[in-house]
Image (cartoon, rainbow, N blue to C red):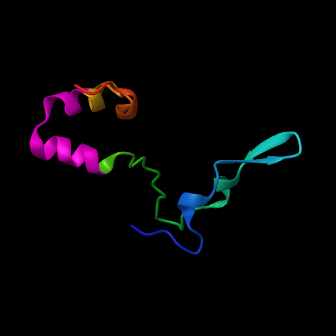
Amino acid sequence: MICRNPNLQQIPKKQKKEAEEEDVRRCFIASPGHLLLKADLSNIELRILAEVANDTTLLRLFAEGADLHSEPLS
């Protein structure tokens, strides 16, 4: 999916305004009968690869919520 006009992926969650923070993304409201979905697609290619390859190590790390970039190479 491509987000444009505005690119929703680049809108910060919090924006500092003087001493208070406000959630900028709250201004987006779904049309009646529709929903907005927020999904975290981090490492989606690696997740798909782990499933297709049935890589037990990667599948375990994803299930544990591990940071793959901080895991030692083996």
54 to 6, vertically: above or below: above
Q: How many marks?
A: 0
Residue 16 located left or right of residue 46: right
Q: Residue at x 19, y 28 (%)?
A: 57
Q: Position of residue 6 (x, y in %)?
A: 60, 70
Q: Quadrant of residue 19?
A: top right
Prevailing secondary structure class for the magenta stretch in the rendered image: helix
Q: Residue at x 64, y 52 (%)?
A: 12
Residue 30 located left or right of residue 21: left
Name, please, the residue furthest toward the right.
Answer: 18
Front-lying residue, 35 or 51 = 51
Q: Position of residue 41 (x, y in %)?
A: 38, 49
Q: Residue at x 89, y 45 (%)?
A: 18
Q: Position of residue 52 (x, y in %)?
A: 12, 46
Determine if the magenta segment contains residue 15. no
- Magenta region: which residues? 45-60
Residue 11 located left or right of residue 2: right
Front-lying residue, 68 or 54 = 68
Q: Position of residue 53 (x, y in %)?
A: 10, 43
Q: Which quadrant: the N terminus?
A: bottom left
